Amino acid sequence: MYFFRKSNPDRPKNFNLKVMHFINATAILLFLAGIIYKLIDWFIK
């Protein structure tokens, strides 16, 4: 149940964890943008 737990206000905020999540989200968005670009390129040709 790791993904469905409530945020604990007593837990300290970790800057490294926030940066890691931001980089991970950016990588996923770039990957999806690349897949969409290749699919559009493939369908047009």
Image: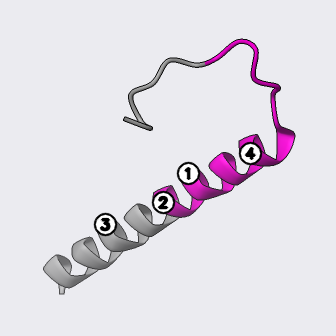
Give the alpha-carbon distance from disc 2 to disc 3, as whole Å: 12 Å
Establish if 18 lies above or below 11: below
Q: Are marks 3 and 4 in contact (CB under 8 Å)?
A: no
Give me the residue at 55% from left, 51% from top.
Answer: 25
- Picture quarter with the C terminus: bottom left
Q: Dot 1 corresponds to which residue? A: 25
Q: Dot 3 corresponds to which residue? A: 36
The amino acid sitting under disc 2 is Ile
Nearer to us: label 3 or label 1: 1
**Residue 27 sits in quarter:** bottom right
**Residue 23 sits in quarter:** bottom right
Q: Is residue 31 magenta?
A: no
Pointer 4 local density, CA inside 10 Å: few below 14, some 14–19, many at least 20: few
Give the alpha-carbon distance from disc 3 to disc 4, as whole Å: 29 Å
Q: Dot 2 corresponds to which residue? A: 28
In this view, the residue in front, 7 or 18, is 7
Q: Are marks 2 and 1 in contact (CB under 8 Å)?
A: yes
Give me the residue at 71% from left, 12% from top.
Answer: 9
Rendered image: mark on residue 17 = 4
Nearer to us: label 1 or label 4: 4
Disc 2, SS: helix
In this view, the residue in front, 24 or 45, is 24
